[in-house]
Image (cartoon, rainbow, N blue to C red):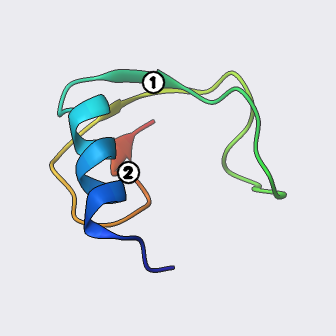
Amino acid sequence: MNYSKEKVDAMKSRYPVGTRIEIISLCNEEIDLQAGLRGTVTRSYRTYPIPCLW
């Protein structure tokens, strides 16, 4: 997926490196990712998905 520079910049400001995040729900079936899983944003990014350590 390609996202606009504005969308990526908005996500980077909302979720800087070190931010703790939690999966609330998913739009598709992901075997390794489940609701309630918590992680930390690990590095700056230029596209989705946000790089996290789960």
Q: Earlier in the sequence, mark 1 or mark 2?
A: 1
Q: Residue at position x 21%, y 35% from top?
A: 13
Q: Residue at position x 76%, y 34% from top?
A: 25
The image's mark for residue 21 is 1
Question: Callout 2: 10 Å neighbours few (<14), some, many (20+)?
Answer: some
Q: Please, is residue 2 above or below residue 47 in the view?
A: below
Q: Is residue 52 visible?
A: yes
- The residue wearing badge 2 is 50
Q: Please, is residue 29 above or below residue 42 in the view?
A: below
Q: Residue at position x 15%, y 50% from top?
A: 44
Q: How far across and down, in percent of the image, does residue 53 sit?
A: 36, 39
Q: Do the numbered discs 1 and 2 sit on residues whose CB atoms are within 8 Å?
A: yes
SS category of the residue bearing label 1:
strand
Q: Is residue 15 visible?
A: no
Residue 35 as seen in the image, left or right of residue 1: right
Residue kind at label 1, given as amino acid type = Ile
Front-most of residues 5 and 19: 5
Residue 17 picture quarter: top left
The residue most toward the front is: 6
Q: Please, is residue 11 above or below residue 39 in the view?
A: below
Q: How far across and down, in percent of the image, does residue 24 sit?
A: 70, 26
Q: How far across and down, in percent of the image, does residue 54 sit?
A: 45, 36
